[in-house]
Image (cartoon, rainbow, N blue to C red):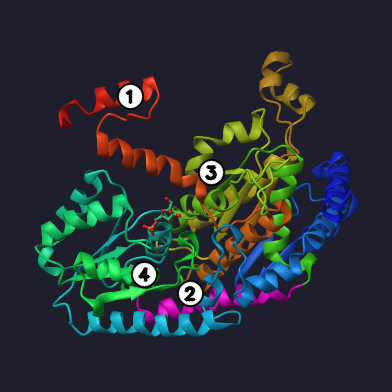
Amino acid sequence: MDERSTAWAAVAEAAREVPTLAGLFGADTGRAGRLSVDVAGLHLDVSKTHLSPGAEAGLAGLLGASGFESVRAALFSGAAVNPSEGRAATHAAERGSGSGQAVAGADTARAMTQRLVERVAAGAFGEIRHILHIGIGGSALGPALLVDALGEGRYDTHIISNIDGVALERAMRACDPARTLVVVVSKTFTTIETMTNAESARDWIGGTARFVAVTAAPEKAVAWGILKENVLGFAESVGGRYSLWSAVGVTAALTLGWPAFEALLAGARAMDRHFETAPMEANAPVLAAMVDVLYAAFLGAETRAVFAYDERLRLLPSFLQQLEMESNGKRVDREGGALTHPSAAITWGGTGTDAQHAVFQLLHQGTHLVPAEFVMVKTPGHGLGAAHHRQLLVNAIAQGAALMRGRTMEEALALSGGDAALAAAKTFPGNRPSSAIVLERLDPHTLGALVAFYEHRTFTAAVMLGINPFDQWGVELGKEMAHAALGDGAGAGFDASSRALLARALTNFA
Ligand SMILES: O=P(O)(O)OC[C@H]1O[C@](O)(CO)[C@@H](O)[C@@H]1O
């Protein structure tokens, strides 16, 4: 057996004997403190998970056997960590972390982005009241998270992604075309949804004078009609789902102001430093990744659920779905060999307390194992008084406590007047895992740290799983087949069912 296989087998062995959560706390009175980390305004607590001392040691061994320290150094130095595309992954350089040429390139690109923000404020595009951001996937989800989380800004900002014209039409109705700046964000500048929406926006405005492009293919944006001075570039080595730190963040920088954008980058840099230097047992992204891999690859959890107990973070679950599933939803390893173990879990979630009244039944009493994550913010985002926020936070914490504690049959019988069937329905198995993240406050700095935490957690899990988190070949086939069917209108290469569906669905467009 090679070193990685041996380390993998050691984790599997530790996972076979993992104690209950109550047992883990009983054996270690310092567990809550030992498995909590404070960094950059973020408190992480993974103590209510089955990360036993044996599993933690095994996973640390797996990281060592997977060359974690050298891959992490390669990430920050700008070396090619994305083998299937032969590229570096320079998102940390975009916020000024690490070394190598990418950091200097990112500094220059950032200065151009700042200049654009200043030009808009100085009236270079006339009086701007609305921003219409057009992009999809990584070219929309990050900016949308930032703008939604950090509240009302200087402009009325709309972020449009879907090809369904309903989305764009609704935004158009809310905006005055004469006072709208359109920001078209597409790394490739070929994505069909984005280009179709951009064309409709161009028709609506009647030209491209108030258009800005953000792309790794600036020549395509210019050929499309956007003035060269309004085109912001970013490097090919910045993946879409990791791109909000680059010029892709310009909509957030415009809406929230440049100092806020700088604070976002500074928060992420603080997390970068922690990730690079903190010891494994006190390294927040590493600990969280160990938990993720333990459940997904060793304990059979097919999903993990993230609940934002804060309305301002309601887009966090959808942002994380792309970050985690597009990064780590792979079936081959870095060398192209078939994975012999599960890759990442399916990420899903919602907001609390809403989700308690919708999906928590399954978490508490269903037959699936679902590690839950509760994300909270200490300070409220409203001025309505303490009752709202107190209830919000207490509910999040009570859910985690209830998942772990459960309710025994004896306790349930006492509540059911001895009715055994009712008592069975009222019994909770408990021993169900959760982790908690508490932010000191929600501001650009802590949000930057939070997003960088999730990026590094995803990367660390990929290292343990042996996969490349920076490519996304799995999105190509469906795109290609849609392209072919748009060309011939009949789906010549499709199966019989899909051809019949095409014929039925497209009768209005013959
Ligand atoms: O920025 P682009 O090139 O328009 O791509 C948008 C998104 O499409 C994807 O390639 C997936 O289809 C994502 O990875 C990316 O974020």
Q: Amino acid at mark 3?
A: Trp
Q: Are marks 1 and 4 in contact (CB under 8 Å)?
A: no
Disc 1 residue type (three-letter): Arg
Q: Secondary structure at mark 1?
A: helix
Query: Mark 4 = which residue?
Result: 252
Q: CA distance from mark 3 to mark 1?
A: 32 Å
User: Whole-Å distance between the Cαs marked 3 and 2?
Assistant: 25 Å
Amino acid type for the residue under numbered disc 2: Leu
- Per the model, the C-alpha gap separating discs 2 and 1 is 48 Å
Cβ–Cβ under 8 Å for marks 3 and 1: no
Q: Which residues are magenta?
A: 256-278
Contact between marks 2 and 4 (CB within 8 A): the answer is yes
Task: Determine the residue positioned at 82% across, 55% down.
Answer: 56
| Depth order, front residue of 136/251 | 136
Residue 342: x %, y % from top left: 68, 41
Which mark is nearer the camera, 1 or 4? 1
Q: Can residue 352 be spotted in the picture?
A: no
Residue 52 to residue 271: above or below = above
Specify the label residue 348 is tagged with: 3
Q: If you read the primary sequence from the N terminus, does the residue marked by circle 2 or circle 4 appear first?
A: 4
